[in-house]
Amino acid sequence: MRRTLIRYKTKPESADRNAELVRAVFAELQAAKPEGVRYLTLRLEDDSFVHIVETAAEDGSSPIPKLKAFQEFQAGIRERCTEPPAPRAATVVGNYRMLNET
């Protein structure tokens, strides 16, 4: 299992559009129901976004980049941001009913 945290900050005028694009990714995930992936996105009050992705594949591969909605979200992401996306590997230090850990 691999976890990745991605953080970026959008321009104030782009934050709502970014949120719409993210919601479209989740709608497509709900429809496709791919196995082996868990995904959460948070929008912070300063228009930063935090994405947490958990994949079951040993190589860390994910079905998310193959989604049409995700590709649309990725198009123009840098133009929407004041701080570009910064992916980082993440290790759980503590978890109380947020993540499905076995």
Image: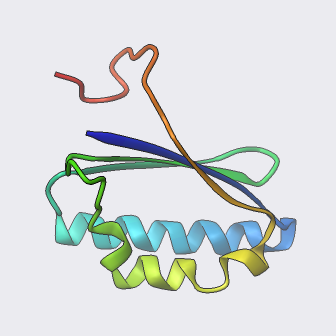
Q: Total label count? A: 0
Please tell me which residue is depicted at 21% across the width and 71% down the height of the picture.
31
Q: Position of residue 55 (x, y in %)?
A: 28, 49
The quadrant of the picture occupied by the N terminus is: top left
Q: Is residue 65 above or below residue 3?
A: below
| 83 or 69, nearer to the observer | 83
Please tell me which residue is depicted at 60% across the width and 65% down the height of the picture.
19
Q: Is residue 28 above or below residue 43?
A: below
The quadrant of the picture occupied by the C terminus is: top left
Please tell me which residue is depicted at 37% across the width and 73% down the height of the picture.
65
Q: Position of residue 4 (x, y in %)?
A: 46, 45
| 92 or 50, nearer to the observer | 92
Q: Position of residue 17 (x, y in %)?
A: 67, 75
| 25 or 84, nearer to the observer | 84
Q: Is residue 70 above or below residue 86?
A: below
Q: How is the image coloured?
A: rainbow
Left or right side of 36 for 7: right
Tell me the quarter of the picture where residue 76 sits: bottom right
Left or right side of 68 for 73: right
Tell which residue pokes out farthest to the front in this image: 59
Please tell me which residue is depicted at 25% across the width and 64% down the height of the picture.
30
Left or right side of 52 for 88: right
